[in-house]
Image (cartoon, rainbow, N blue to C red):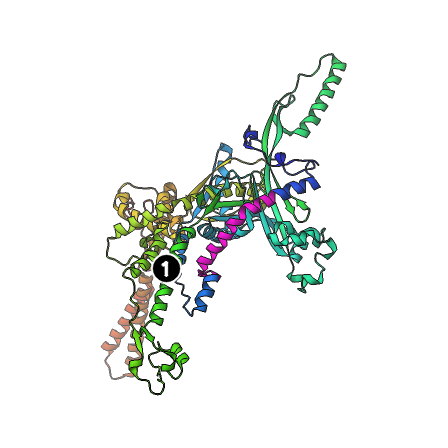
Amino acid sequence: MARNSSALFPDDEDDVSTNEAPAIQSGDDFKPSDELFETLKAKAIEIRDHMDPWWTEAKSCYDMYAGHQWSEEDRQILEAQLRPVITFNRIAPVVDSLIGMEMNDRKQVQYYPRTMGDVAINQLYSSAAMWVREQSDAEDEESDSFLDLSISGMGWTDTHLVQDESEDGRLDIRIDRVDPLEMGKDPNSKKRNLADAKVIARFREMPLAEAEDMFPDFDEYALNAAWASDTDSQELVDRPRKYLFNDPKAGTASRSKKTVTIVEIQWWEKRPFWKVLDPFTNEITHFSDKEFQVAKKRFEELSQRMFTLTGAPLPPIQAARYKRKVFRRAFLGNEILKIAPLPYPYGFSYQCMTGKRDRNKKHWFGLIRAMKDPQEWANKWLSQILHIINSNAKGGLIAQKTTFEDWRFVEKNYSRPDAVLWLAAGKTADDVGRRDPVQFPAGIYQLMSFAIDSIRDANGVNLEMMGLADRDQAASLEYQRRQSGMTVLAQFFNSLRQYRKRQGRAMLYMIQKWLGDGRLVRITVDSGEQQYVPLLQNADEQTLEYDVAVDEVASSPNQKEQVWSMLLQAMPFLQQINLPGQVWADIIKYSPLPDSLAQKIGQVLNVPPDQAQEAFAQTMQQLTMALAKANVDATNAQAADDRASAVGKTAKAMSDVAAAELNASKAMGARLDAIEQIVNGMTAMGGARPAVSAPIQPQLPAPQPATQSPFVGVPQ
């Protein structure tokens, strides 16, 4: 299919309408061709040439962060002069302080519906987004990308679909960090986070076996985009096909060590589409230009047939022509390997966050560009001072070579305090002159301190931000200075916030489109309980409209610390305004308590007031029944004690009778007394017993309202 460069990458004046209709995927009207390959190849080479200076600078910035802060030329000079190569890496703590702020103050994406029908599933999609991010370790990947942003000026992630290893092979969403040195941007892009980019490219070097697994229908020659590698690889491009990988002069490396370059290029172009009023349903439908021409022809044929049968044609078709963005993706080797649809048809799968703008060079840079010179000068001055101290500890000597027995030994070991310097025969100490030790310039220490302080000052990072302020100052003053440092670096966090919005829109579409297979998603309901809800695809298969908002994460340490400190100050006032339990449950989320304990407390506090009164009444009823049962048990126990006492008396009387019978000398009166005691004992045992009264109902006081506590709505 013949296509020119202007059609693939349109100018701004072509943007005559907004993207109101669903995007078009790559279809039958978009086929690989030699002309298309040459157009994409030319655009990729243009991007590579534009990015080459930035890639070189970014590599040096990564070296500075990693502690490789001497150039190879300077290192060789110092080693030749026997001078120490010293590196005190003060750049890394400055960058790490910024990364730590991002980790301790992470944000989350919330979806707010625009239509009334979407309100019920608002919480489901927000929780599904959190679930996707947890499954793909998105927070860790984005923190790595934010580190790339701080070092080089650009951080990239790739939001894409992967197939899991289960039997059904369902799709999952992954968010992965991408190496900035593989990515190339539109040379004409000017907006933050490349919001106006029309084309981006990824130049990826991968093992040959991995490339063959991705594109099994192509050979080694077709898989390698040697034209996109370094300039010295042009010789490989010009080689005959059969000698490219089989030439013995190319090396004897095994096949597993061979690498090829694959270029992935994504772009958008304006394509016409039609809004047509369906005369039969009176609904607006969308057609591509090709589909509209077919539908128009069929409608005209139907109208002519109606005119033949009835004498009255159909009313004319009502349609309007617009333009919209259509996003494309292609994989290039030495030819077009694949044209694939994007998982999110309204934007690129690669999302970028940008740092500080270099307007003239049309690039972005991070923190290290400003800190590079102060760090290098601090290292050089320190190395110079140590060299002076080592080589001039005792000044120097002025003497002829014949003054010493071995002048080379003296030259090498003179600065050693334990060295013995032997004079030649007939020579004395007066034959040796001495130079005074070299004096340091008066301001050399101030210059080195200035260079060290400038490493932080170049970007506005103060000691309070790094937690290294070793001076007595009020906590409020230290907090204000820390916030001032945050203000200087606010543009980095602004780029991160904009990135989360754009990436959140892409993830919402992909959740609705690709994850609606009934899988269970864990959500947290208003009561604080966690439930598993199936994620189903929309019945009408239409994308629901949501506003994407970036909110604070309650679990971030900084956020919990700040909110809880403010709540403690306002707690006396909050206790007096009788807040409902739901509000107290939200307050508990920001407490320093463990998440499991805070969740249980939130579940108790979220009980509605009417349910709380019902629970209170049930509790009082259970308490009344328990008290009544205890009273009955006590009465029965008292009766059992009385019976045991009567049995004891009877046994004692019988013992007395036996004793009286054995004692024949006792008088008849004593026997009569014994018999009378027996009769009295039998009467007590078999006669009238103490009656057991009915259970006594406890007289409980009337229920009183629960006393107020910080957690209103829960009775103490």
Residue 324 horizontal side relative to residue 692, left or right: right
Magenta residues (range): 43-72
Figure check: 358 above or below 632: above
In the figure, residue 401 lies in which quadrant?
bottom left
Quadrant that contains the N terminus: top right
Question: Who is closer to the viewer here, 369 or 655?
Answer: 369
Residue 665 horizontal side relative to residue 529, left or right: left
Which residue appears at 28% of the width and 71% of the height? 436
Dot 1 corresponds to which residue? 378
| Amino acid at circle 1 | Ala
- Would residue 132 be seen by someone viewing this image from the given angle? no
Q: Residue furthest bottom?
A: 425
Question: Who is closer to the viewer here, 176 or 632?
Answer: 176
Question: Who is closer to the viewer here, 6 or 53?
Answer: 53
47 falls in the magenta region:
yes
Q: x, y (%) of residue 580?
A: 34, 42
Q: x, y (%) of residue 188?
A: 52, 39
Which residue appears at 38% of the width and 81% of the height? 402
Q: x, y (%) of residue 340?
A: 65, 43
Residue 165 horizontal side relative to residue 434, left or right: right
Question: Who is closer to the viewer here, 381 or 295?
Answer: 381
Numbered disc 1: secondary structure: helix
Q: Residue furthest top?
A: 311
Residue 573 horizontal side relative to residue 344, left or right: left
Magenta stretch: helix, strand or loop mostly: helix
Disc 1 packing (10 Å; few <14; some 14–19; many ≥20)? many
- Mark count: 1
- Would residue 485 be seen by someone viewing this image from the given angle? yes
Q: x, y (%) of residue 247?
A: 71, 60
Figure check: 691 above or below 9: below
534 falls in the magenta region:
no
